[in-house]
Image (tube, rainbow, N blue to C red):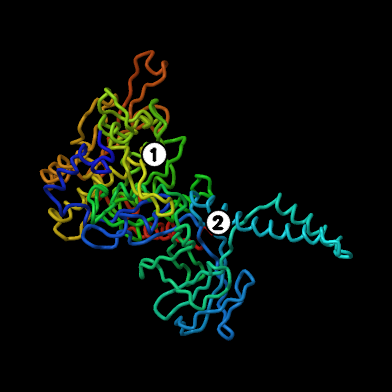
Amino acid sequence: MQYPPTPHVPVDETQVSAFLAKNPAYDGRGTLIAVVDSGIDPLAHGLQVTSDGKRKVVDYIDCSGAGDVAMSNPMKAADGTLPGATGRTLKLNPQWLNPTDTWRVGMKRMFDITPIEVLPKIMRARETVLKRDVMRLKNDVAARLDDSEAGDNRKELEVQRDMLDVFDRQYCDFGPVFDCVVFHDGEQWRAAIDTSETGDLSEAEALGAYKLTGQVGMLSRRFLVPYTLNFYDQGQILSIVTCSIDHGTGVAGILAAYDPDNAQNNGVAPGAQLVSIQVAGYRQNGNIPILSRTLALKTLVDYNVNLMVTSIISYVSEPNFGHNIDLINQHIIRKHRCIAVAAIGNDGPALSTVMSPGGTTDWIIGAGAYYTPEQIKDLYAMCSDAGEAAFNFSSRGPATDGSRGVDIYAPGCAITTNPAYIGSRKDIVQGTSHAAPNLCGCLALLVSAWKQEVDKGAGNKVSPFRIRNAIMATARQFGDDLGVGLVQTTDAWEFLKKHAGRASEDVFFEFRISMPGDAHGIYLRDLEDSATPRELSVAVQAVHIDDPLAELDNDMDEAYAEETLKRVYSFDMRVA
């Protein structure tokens, strides 16, 4: 048994290590991957630069609305001060460049944007300080009451004592409230946040949007809570972007971490760049509003990403159905050629336990969680004679409409990156949430290889259908009951090269079965389904990636499609 295992992220079973040994430049370079999750920590180890020296995360976007701050109408400063939204008088930094001398102010409660793991630590620290001050006051009042000269002040002192007792018993902390100032420096929007709660911004730094400046601020230096900024609607909305939980950082670490000093800390695709798209604000209790989901899809389009990975899953009553699914299929995958990978859930091993979107959407590649005895021994110090298999918790197909449910397996355990605020660099994780980024990293290697060797810089995106067909055709069987295989990177790349000129690889075949509901496969689960012979008709439709119907059916001049896309991705307001 070796602990920790080398490397921390399993790459041997999927042929990644052999692929990179032969093709070191095909390590994800040139690919941009969206991590649609709970956000990535800007301070996380291994998520700072790519293997070729570029910034690892090109932008941090909050689509949950948790960090949105509605700013005031423009106002002028008086003697270098502004009235803050909290009521404090804000002293501005005289070094800030503001040609128009117009400012906007707003406020944000810190606990609305504090990562859930560090929130109790901050609350305990604040409670300790406050109760210490309350105890000092109570002791002072008690001493004055014991003084024989209290006299006429005794009744007032007794009221103070009772009020302090009530305060001590009914203590409730709503957290710090920060003043925010937004202005335009002539080139870009900037903002300063009064994390000291003093109103003194005379020496504060005004940060710009991370995409333009790469600047990272600190909500709390003691507890290592960083933030980045975005601006919307001409400065009317300031977006303060933080992590909601640690999950997204761990996903990013498996996918694309790069440690220049120790290769065993690398993720699957250390050369890839990332876009952090936060949709999981913990204030929503795991429910992602449809507006958040649609804003996330708009971000995929805006950044023209090559791949996306998400572990944000939910139950649905009907597979392959819904407005959000239509947007992903037709606009994200088909029109913009983004390869979509998603977890399929951890509700196994019963049949039909897959979750949306990974297990219930045909065009999204659903990743199941796989393990080997060596991984179990190294990570958990457990011995098993069962051999390689799917994790027991990994959800199983088929979907209720008869579609596959699980498309392919990837390693579902790893030692991955933690946010800095956790206090430890690494953690052991397991789940289909962690199989999905491993699989996405494998696909990023294939896309990187395609861009460099086949496309040769022409700028044409490889078809998601072609990548899907390659990994499905070359997956290695390991005894899964439903015949789902394990991704094999080298074999898939050889398949892609061999069939690079075959147009039929850019086709996805859809099946429709004459059964109740919109059946995508023959699924005879209940006893009555197979009690008597049945005659079923099967319709097969070839969906071409470049079919003009991808815009909108029966739209000859595409004008209606253009207007529809504007309507789909146009918003008058954000979640806030």
Q: Nearer the viewer, residue 226 or 63?
A: 226
User: Does residue 496 sit above or below 207 in this rendering?
Assistant: above
In this view, the residue farthest toward the front is 148
In the displayed structure, would residue 96 be above or below residue 461? below
Give the answer, above or below, for where 58 lies relative to 354.
below
Q: Residue at x 35, y 43 (%)?
A: 342
Q: For the residue marked with disc 1, what is the amino acid? A: Asn
Q: Residue at x 23, y 52 (%)?
A: 262
Quadrant showing the C terminus: bottom right
Quarter of the rendering containing residue 132: bottom right
Comparing 318 with 292, the one in front is: 292
Query: Does residue 361 appear left or right of residue 171 in this picture?
Result: left
Q: Residue 24 placed where, x, y %?
A: 15, 52
The answer to whether 365 is drawn above or below residue 232 in the figure is above
Q: Tell me the number on the disc at residue 320.
A: 1
Q: Position of residue 179 (x, y in %)?
A: 56, 69
- Please identify the quadrant where the N terminus is shown: top left
Q: Is residue 363 visible?
A: no
- Amino acid bearing label 2: Phe
Query: Which callout, 2 or 1, points to the residue nearer the camera?
Result: 2
Q: Quadrant of residue 432?
A: top left
Residue holding disc 2 = 111
Residue 384 image position (x, y, % from top left): 29, 25
Q: Is residue 170 left or right of residue 177?
A: right
Mark 2 vs 1: CB contact within 8 A: no
Q: Is residue 222 left or right of residue 535?
A: right
Mark drawn on residue 463: none
Secondary structure beneath label 2: helix
Coordinates of residue 41 in the picture (x, y in percent)? 39, 56
Residue lying at the far top of the rendered structure: 531
